Amino acid sequence: MLINSFRLPVRSILFFATIFLLIAIPNLQAQQTPANKTNTEWWNVGYHWPVKNPNAKLLPLIRVSGNKFVNSKNDTILFRGVSIADPDKIEHEGHWNKLLFEKVKEMGAILVRIPVHPVAWRDRTPEKYLVLLDSAVNWCTSLGMYIDIDWHSIGNLEMELFQNPMYNTSRKETYEFWRTISAHFTGNNTVAFYELFNEPTTYRGQLGTVTWHEWKEINENIIHLIRAFDKETIPLVAGFDWAYDLTPLREEPINAAGIAYVTHPYPNKRSQPWEPKWDEDFGFAASQYPVIATELGFSVRNGDPSDGAEHYGTRITKYLENNGISWLAWVFDPEWGPQLLKSWDFNLTPSGEFFKKAMQSSSNK
């Protein structure tokens, strides 16, 4: 009798306890899940600009004066350096560290070009990619080297057609990239240049059409956007034909002060004799504007010379130096070509040895 009299209360307790748990646990989990809070309070989410780097002013500010780059003492600076590979690639391969930049410094470089591919920017996420760039800025500051941040796409930004999926982007993403970068690095003297777009090309019509006027307008829009955040870092504008051809500047230069222009004078761009064609295609511009060859390089096949008076490397570096054009060798990586490195042991290829000698001899003049 006593046992039977307690059967109903026990069942009732179990029933109500079950109901309580079904209601309480989901509510408790919802309170403890930050993602839930973020999703429901989207109105409190905004852009969070970083705290400024305390070492931002350690290097002298670089600015444009006429057709030259000058420092805070008004000394003319002719930049020589190298491009590295995309930081996302280097980090995945386990070599994103200060040693990489120390080896770049040993080459004689005073400027490091950092190419940011749109696909890497998206996949890593801007917030996490900025962590890589912040590391590079800190390392370069301590080593006395400047940085050129390059939006590394190839193609036709007007029609949003690109040469390879890794370069796929859009005008909106490009504007957002420069909005983020310029807000993040404003006031940091180590970041001397913003290279707005790596290599504009229509790929002989396979990527549509674009006029210089349309390209000019896109660049002016980016520059205006950047200068809403950062009025000091120098924008770099690339010419057509994979950033080689600056001839449109004769008729229609970019409507912005304090900028510079980019050329990529690889040996295959024109047949020999090179020098008169270089004068015609980009050299003329250096008499009026600062010009920087942010990519140049060559491969050496077995048995081929890597230097000599008639060699491309000798002739292009001599031409650039004589015309006051800064230059950066492509690329300080053992995989992307033309390689300056044989391996991650930092052994140099013949072209790497050539550019090291060219940088060091030029800096000692």
Image: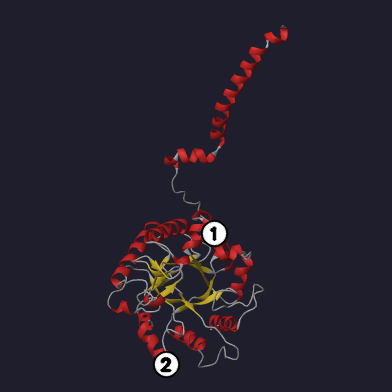
Give the left or right position of residue 8, taking residue 365 as reference.
Answer: right
Residue 344 seen in the current view: yes
> x%, y% of residue 274?
42, 89
Residue 134: image tag: 1
Residue 151 in view: no
Observer-nearest residue: 51 or 243? 243
Percent x, y for residue 172?
A: 38, 58
Q: Is residue 166 above or below residue 261?
A: above
At x 58%, y 30%, the residue is 25
**In which quadrant of the rendered view does residue 13 lie?**
top right
Is 23 situated left or right of 202 in this image?
Answer: right
Name the residue nearer the viewer: 23 or 154.
23
Mark 2 and mark 1 lie on one chain; the one further toward the N terminus is 1
Looking at the rendered structure, the kind of residue marked 1 is: Asp
Q: Secondary structure at mark 2?
A: loop
Query: Which tag is nearer the camera, tag 2 or tag 1?
Result: 2
Residues at badges 2 and 1 in contact (C-beta under 8 Å)?
Answer: no
Q: Position of residue 150 (x, y in %)?
A: 46, 67
- Within 10 Å of disc 2 (Cα), the crowding (few <14, some 14-19, many 20+) is few
